[in-house]
Amino acid sequence: MKNLKKLLCGALSLTMVLGLAACGGNTATTDSTDGDTAAKADGNVPVIGISQYGQHASLDNCREGFLQGLQEAGLVEGTDYTIDYQNASFDDNMAIQIAQSFSAENAALMVGIATPSATACYAAAEDKDIPVIFTAITDPVGAKLDSGNITGTSDVLPVEGQLKLIRALQPDAKTIGIVYTTSESNSVYSVGVYQEKAADYGFTIEAVGVTAQSEVTQAVDNLIAKGVDCFSNLTDNNVVGVLGSILEKTNEAKIPVYGSEIEQMKKGCAAGAGLDYVQLGIQTGKMAAKVLTGEATCQDMPYEVIENYSTYINSKSLEQLGITLPDDVAQSAEDVANA
């Protein structure tokens, strides 16, 4: 039975890899270095397979920070490693195929940016015991990525910091609206924390779950109709992907949206207590460098929760919404209106 299971798994892996090759560049974005093919052929330069679940500024910043972290650790691309970067375009099946392709090419290290990509990499790497590094995962325990040959960095949102900020900017606000994807474990976890902490700051939470990006703006309309005082945006991939459309609706209704990382404020969210995803990526890259050089194994390094956060404001958005910025917030916040 065991041999039969291995045979079936191997056949499935081959089928998925062939399917990925047949799809070419139409469904996944690849960005390998010029020396990548030669590196795979002679095996002299370790290949790092990076699977990014989708393309938006937060995840892009994670990837750029990761590469910066490798460099800061003293590693040189083309000499110490080569990159095979692929983008799943928010498609779970594509994330699985990408991970299987990394396993088939015997990558020295897999990197999963966001939970679906990390989960797929871990499943594909397990049979060959390939180390996996993850980033931009809010709940590694819930995603079952907290044991084995895997580690990385967690982007747990500073929910209490966000609630304090909202209360400072909107002293009379009562209800916070949140739109989230029901299949994203990160989002489900974060909504639970909001619901647990909200009453401590005098808020109630109106949360609407969606199953696809096409449902997001309708959910926003529903919450506006219910009379929420503001929205708090998570790092939910489906929601962030249509943030521009959300802001069009909320700005017209004069309802503030609070973001959870710097790029969301740059796009027009009024303010937010959030993380710097470039720094998150840098820390992840430094952890990966230790694994790649043999200085440490994934088991030697428990995943790290990045707890430091900053307060960001968009002064133009605040002005348009008629919100006065308290002096104490102004002194500690970074204005990204012109960034």
Image (cartoon, rainbow, N blue to C red):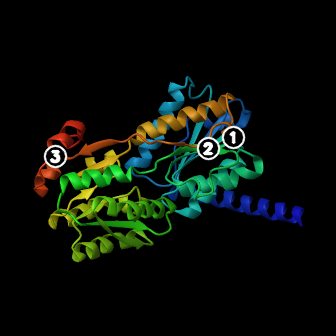
Q: Tell me the quarter of the image containing the C terminus.
A: top left
Q: What residue type is labelled 3?
A: Ser
Vertically, is 180 above or below 50? below
Task: Calculate the distance from the C-alpha at mark 1 to the C-alpha at mark 2.
Answer: 7 Å
Q: Mark 3 sits on what residue? A: 315
Tell me which residue sits at (31%, 70%) in the image: 217
Q: What residue type is labelled 2?
A: Thr
Q: Do the residues labelled 1 and 3 touch (CB within 8 Å)?
A: no
Q: In the rendered image of this protein, does residue 207 appear above or below residue 41?
A: below
Q: Nearer the viewer, residue 267 or 32?
A: 267
Q: Where is residue 149 in the image (x, y as percent from the top left)?
A: 69, 45
Mark 1 vs mark 3, CA separation in Å: 45 Å
Side (left or right) of 123 relative to 255? right
173 relative to 37 in the view: left or right: left
Residues packed near mark 2 inside 10 Å, few (<14), some (14 to 19) or many (20 plus): many
Q: Residues within 10 Å of mark 3 (few under 14, many from 20)?
A: many
In this rendered view, identify the residue nearer to me: 15 or 76: 76
Determine if residue 267 is in view: no
Q: Which mark is residue 299?
A: 1
Of the image marks 3 and 2, the number of the one nearer the N terminus:
2
- Count neighbours of disc 1 (C-alpha within 10 A) and say few if under 14, some if 14 to 19, many if 20 or more: some
Q: Can residue 89 be seen in this view?
A: yes
Q: Which amino acid does label 1 sit on?
A: Gln
Q: Which mark is residue 16?
A: none
Q: According to the image, label 2 marks what residue? A: 151
Q: Quadrant of residue 221?
A: bottom left
Please report contact status of discs 1 and 2: CB closer than 8 Å, yes or no: yes
Above or below, 53 relative to 8 = above
Dot placed on the residue nearer the N-terminal end, 1 or 2:
2
